Image: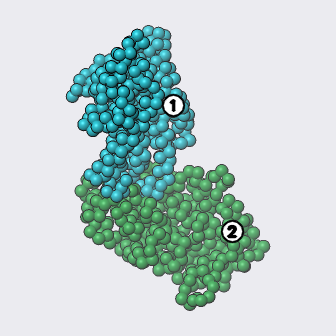
Chain colours: A green, B cyan
Amino acid sequence: MTAPTLKLVNLKTHFFTREGVVKSVDGVDFEVKAGEVLGLVGESGSGKSVTGFSILGLIDPPGRIVDGQILYRGEDLTRATPERLRALRGKNIAMVFQDPMMTLNPVLRVDTQMIEAVRAHDDVDDAAARARALAALAQVGIPSPEARLRSYPHQFSGGMRQRVAIAIALLNRPDLIVADEPTTALDVTIQGQILFEMRKLCRDTGTALIWVTHDLAVVAGLADHIAVMYAGRIVEHGPTATILEQPRHPYTRGLIGSVPTRGHRGQALFQIPGMAPSPLRLPPGCAFQPRCDRASDQCATMPDLRDMAPDHHARCWHPVA
Amino acid sequence: MLVFIIRRLMQAVVVMVVMSALVFGGIYLIGNPVAMLISDQASEADRLAVIRDLGLDQPIWQQYLTFVGKALVGDFGKSFRAGEPAMRLIFQHMPATLELAVIAMTIAVLIGVPLGLYAGLRPDSFGARSIMTVSILGFSLPTFWVGLMLIMLFAVALPDWIPGWPRLPSSGRGPTVDVFGLKLSFLTAQGWLHLLLPAMTLALAKGALIIRLTRAATREVLPMDYVKFARAKGLRERRIVGVHVLKNIAIPIATVTGLELGQVIAFAVVTETIFSWPGMGKLLIDSILLLDRPVVVAYLVIIVFFLVLLNLLVDILYSVLDPRVRLDATAR
């Protein structure tokens, strides 16, 4: 058993807004090992992106990490100094953002943005940094990378920009990448290519990958493990095949049921009734209870994550059989 | 690019023609300059002779056509009052105004951008709140009052109260140095002292504007994904602010600075009057008072040319600052 690259222990990130405290992440535990892909799945507002940003220490006020530990190779990042966090960011832990049209600075050339990322961490000269940028662009499949280095972001398509962003994430050979819905804004064909390449990269280099998404279909072919988040907590966690084939939490079952498949052709898709609760007014106990057809009085108290099988946990009093 | 510049210059010509016609007609309506130029005791024959000399006996449209015909070959007529060519008068007064305007805007940018950047980066700090409060005063106080107060303070009160406090000159531009035929003050220490008060008066209002603009632009850029991504790359804060933020906010700042510079050159009249600064603004006021039409028209033609030129420079600067902007024939 190798030690995990990243381990979250009871992570809580809250936002102190004028309307009240938003508990975006409220006690999240998971771990990712080297070369492993974790799919962090949830709908908008479930806290999955905030979890990702918390790992890099990129939570802006009024939000802050109020409790818990982020253990990167055993080092607790919630106690790290800003300078230590800066040194880790982009070097050991990299991130890819959701919207490729917005991630690259529009007024700086691609080579500027890549070389600065290398030189922020390694004391190398311009030529060496440029060579690494070139290699990274080639690695993510950008044609004629030499010419493309001198281009501005607006001269790239969305898919190409996301490749550039991924190349920047790979520049310093991080051992953990947090990808925040990086394929959501892309065409399905481009999405498929990027998923395939990311998976291959992690296998080859032993990089751990956390893939944040709202799309179960995306992680189905990518992730080793899936963690499903709802209202700031993980409600189900286990190996991908187990989660997809034998979901135990009613919410996970609902998510899987609402994915269109060929077998359902012509039939109405399953819908989870109701709407995700406002993060300011979460119901007491299980947050999914108002939308759940299996809810009982017991659900007024918050269930713990319980073992359903070895390595498979669900946060439910009445798990689906 | 060339097409773009030519198109702009053609626009300038159209504006100049329309504007000169308006000013021509306007001054004709206001009154007869002859009354200002000839003493009451002059005989009727003298009066008629002067009117004929100045060409004022012809109908207004004919006067205008004569003016346009001569203007096409660069002759904007002679000043009614001084008898000198109007353009020469203006060019004599121009270096003083340009110098004052450029130095005032430089001070405004050098003070405004850092303060605005600070206020944008730490919007809740005491320093930022103080900067913003003072900046409201900066652009809401009228220029003439600010100018008078600065004179009171630095040329009168402080030197009186504190022995040894240097008394700043409050009028004129002091000794000048000839540079390629331009008379400039800022090359001598005395000239600098003369420049200080009028330049500060102009810089206060423009600086306040730039502070607020820089702050607003910074607040707009900071939450952008590319700034967060720069943080995620592990860049140092200095590089994030100094390159990623600054290069993006430079675009609106350059635009406004260019336009404001044009405004200062064209309309520093009040400040020039208060400080007896021998610039174009003062010349314009004197000429309007005497209905000295050739000078007023020539002045406005020059100003239109300047504003168009500055706009052109701003547009070219734009394409340097923002790679997404390309100046081609289709751009307007």
Task: Find numbered disc 2 in the image and state the secondary structure of the residue it sits on.
Answer: loop
User: Callout 2: few (<14), some (14-19), or many (20+) C-alpha neighbours within 10 Å?
Assistant: many
Q: Is residue A77 above or below residue A206?
A: above
Residue position for label 2: A287
Q: Nearer the viewer, mark 1 or mark 2?
A: 1
Q: Residue at 50% across / 47% down in the picture? A: B219
Where residue A55 appears, as percent x and y from the top left, is: 50, 60
Q: Is residue A149 above or below residue A239?
A: above
User: Callout 1: few (<14), some (14-19), or many (20+) C-alpha neighbours within 10 Å?
Assistant: many
Hey, which residue is sitting farthest right in the picture? Answer: A297
Q: Residue at 26% across / 64% down in the picture? A: A147
**Mark 1 → mark 2, Cα distance in angstroms:** 53 Å
**Looking at the image, do the residues carrying marks 1 and 2 touch, with CB atoms under 8 Å apart?**
no
From this viewpoint, is residue A86 visible?
A: yes
Residue position for label 1: B138
Q: Amino acid at mark 2?
A: Ala
Where residue B246 appears, as percent x and y from the top left, is: 40, 46
In-front residue for pair B194/B269: B269
In-front residue for pair A141/A32: A141
